[in-house]
Image (cartoon, rainbow, N blue to C red):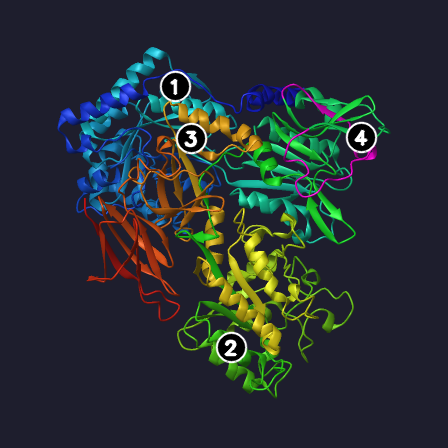
Amino acid sequence: MDRLKAISERIAIMATEIQGGGATPRSSGGRWVSSVSRLRRAALSAGSMLARAVVAAGAISCVPAQAHAADAHEAAAAARQTQANIAFFDGAHPPVDLLQAFDAVVMDPANAFDPAAHPLAHTVWMARAPAANGDAASFVAQQIEPLWQRGYRGFLLDTPAAIAAIDAIRAAHPDARLIAGGDDALQAALPHATALYAVLGPSLVRGAAPGGTRTLDVTPAERAARSDAAHAFTQRTGVPVVSIELCPGDDRACARATAAQVVASGVTPYVTNAAHNVVGIGAIEVMPRRILIVQDRAPDLPLDETPGVRAAATPLNYLGYDVQYADMNDPLPDDVTPDRYAGVVVWIEGDEPRDTAAWRRWVDARIAAHVPVAFIGQFGFDAAEDEGPALDLQPVAGPFTDAVSVVSRDPMIGFETEPRLGPRDLTGVRVGAASQSLLRVKSGEATLDPVAITPWGGYAMSPYTVVSLNGIGQERWAIQPIRFFAAALRLQPMPLPSVTTENGRRLFMTHVDGDGFASRAEFPGADYSGEALYEQIFTRYKVPMTLSVIEGEVGPQGLYPKISPRLEEIARKMFALPYVAIGTHTYSHPFEWENVDAQTGERIDRGGGDTAFSLNIPNYKFNIDREITGSIDYINSRLAPPGKKTVVLQWPGNCEPPAIVVRKVYAAGVANINGGDTVITKSANSWTNIAPIGVSKGPGAYQVYAPNQDENVYTNDWLGPFYGFTRVLETFDMTDRPLRFKPVDIYYHMYSGTKVASLRALDQIFAAVLKQPVLPVQITDYTSKVLDWRSFAVARAVRGASAPADAATSSASAAGAVSGASASTAAAVTWIVRGNGEVRELRWPGANAPDLRASHGVTGYAAGPDGTYIHIADGAARVTFDATAGTAAATSNAGVPYIAQANGFVRRFTRTGNRLSFEFGGYYQPFVELANAQRCSVSVAGRPVAARRDGDRLRFDTAPAAGLPIDYQPVEVACGG
């Protein structure tokens, strides 16, 4: 009953998301404008430089993690130039990817976390210092110094003795960020204010009662007194005050309302739970970008071939979410909480789980914890009969025998195909008043809802999932999956990290698997396929490309020792090209990876001989280390030119390696690519033919899929027609418009060099792609972006409780997803994004542009096929949208120069007034196009450069990189008033 009660309470909280558009927590306290204005006026009248540094609550810092001030006072002032954005986390397993959105994270150093193993460019790890014993010098030597050596670069000092040691800490470590806390923290901190990063003051709304065993609401009178004291301290010193507030860990509505209330009072909040082991809401709310897919996977079915990977992951990736997988019949994770997961997708195709009761308990716990759940296919238990009232579901008695007629349907139903719905397909369920039916049907007197959005998530029962078209061997979506998942999981519009685009141009890469390197060219001239490709493709198209060989095909210990000298000669020649990166395609090219033991990495002999498993190399017994590190060592020692090494392993065969093999590739220090099956064409026009970005096979085992498939697929397994690879141009177009799912990857094999038709096809493809607005990159640029994308943090600035934009954002999330509303309806908000610097583009799903004057770290933007693409500098930015500026941001960005597009890479970007400074370089025909640049002039490396002008646009070109390392040139853009 407790479980059902919790779910019922969840419905009460979430019902407004269906009927009213979204849960909009409201709280008292409308003093945001007046208190901040008062704070600003007081800061100006005080005349203090430190006081002038205080900005309105809600502004977010993007300053580097370490201050580089000349002395302690300058370092402290530099670190707090904007409002403190601090998290407090004491859990055993800190989610680094989410916490990196904060400028500083205070932790309990008694936990096993190693800050030195997780360095972040924009976040400082801080330790709660132990109680001080002895004099200040002893405290620093015995307590602070060991923490500093572990990688902590700041400290929370919450005892009088520790606070008294501030000067000694500063003397030892001038760059340390220091927070004063404890009883009477404001009074104790006052003498040391110039050395402080922030002060941890008392709670304003709800804090810990004495003893810490329960929470205690702060009375309005006490709240006002504490708020006034915090304001007075900040006005006097310029040091921000932070308050820790408490809410239940799974109650994000409470946390949002509390944070907004504290922000409205002019103090920086951090709302967490009593154990401090959730990602709380402070000056920002970090948006979880992880979704768990639970499925009933057959024991002998590789993860890569499950519907969660083949079908569900792609729309979720497009929406900006990384996916993890679990088996319904295995022990399921219990840390699926709303601070870390955006939702759960359950995809059930077969029988009910082995333990139905355990499965129900797990699902109920997720719903009770406010984690949205979307069911695909089946529930796995009789949801309407067992828990109908709690889930807002009504059981409908069967059996159903009469013909089925449609009563009502949402436009997302029947997306790529319309299944034939018979009475035997029906699940006996109808939704209640708190839910929204997306498909309502009748069979006789029975009314049923096969698809619906509910207060706890949503469901799409079979056959309104992926339908098999058995006659042609294809599949189709019976429901629009992007809109359905967005609605069911309450996925909010936000700026999404992009792995398809940089500086407004679609990424373009090319990589070649080594198969067929020993094959003879079937025409006069070149002897082997590699030589033919070298002459007609590799040296004609001087773009970054990654080429690979199979050691067992090329090397002297392989299949062809007599011709190995010639093959190695060709390999050395192609690897020596300055724009070529080197890959390995393993030693023996395993074909069927399911025959590799998932626990040991050894081969499982299922019969069929060596030829059925890999290349049949004489006297070779399969060894996974020989396949990976052995082939890498061979290439590096015999084929690679000086200064180059193997950088990537290109999966061979069916490209479905087990996790143990993927981990060994990472341990070898190289990237990995291949797998997935992106083969969408006009004759196979379905999103089911677009693979996800990759697949997580467990910790440290993420396999990066190739953006699209190779020529073998387009030539009927190399049976012909051998010009068939030109159809990949259809794939490139259909994965770009109307939605940009993928970058461009010309991915093929060495055997394409054996035939005139296949060589001509490659020539046609390269020529066509290079006429498009693409940005050539290395394949490892892409794989690095994918890994950064997975951990990329997106956070929304918290505004005062009375600010309407936050309400619009939350309410638009569910209703907008169902109705197709534009993200621009919730645009008046600031977002903070942070990664490791590989991802440098955001896709905003609205048509409106960022406010360049109010944003930081934004180099420019461009309209894309599916929203606005925003260019960011060095992996971190504060992006502000001005809802009043319209789709072209005509008001806020008038006269502000920015990068509209660039065929190259922008680094170290700064904007000072109407001057831009950055470094620039690129591989192939690099150029920069500036907008609002009518009165601008450009110099590169200190010399004025000629520019082409077209209206408000200005374009200048630079020399391409001579090799794979980019030679960045300093660029200065000066614009007149």
Q: Amino acid at mark 1?
A: Val
Q: Quadrant of the C terminus?
A: top left
The residue at 31%/64% (across/down) is 958
CB contact under 8 Å: marks 3 and 2:
no
Pointer 4: what residue?
Answer: 404
Q: Main secondary structure of the magenta part?
A: loop
The residue at 45%/30% (across/down) is 825
C-alpha distance separating marks 2 and 1: 71 Å
Looking at the rendering, the stretch of residues picked out in magenta corresponds to: 409-434
C-alpha distance separating marks 2 and 4: 60 Å
Task: Name the foreground residue: 360 vs 583.
Answer: 583
The residue at 52%/28% (across/down) is 250
Q: Tell me residue 240's x, y (percent).
A: 27, 30
Please, which residue is most extreme toward the front here? 951
Pointer 2: what residue?
Answer: 536
At numbered mark 2, what does the secondary structure look like: helix, strand or loop? Answer: helix
Q: Amino acid at mark 3?
A: Ile
Say which mark, if any, is on residue 281: 3
Say which mark, if any, is on residue 205: 1
CB contact under 8 Å: marks 1 and 3:
no
Q: Tell me residue 470's x, y (percent).
A: 78, 50
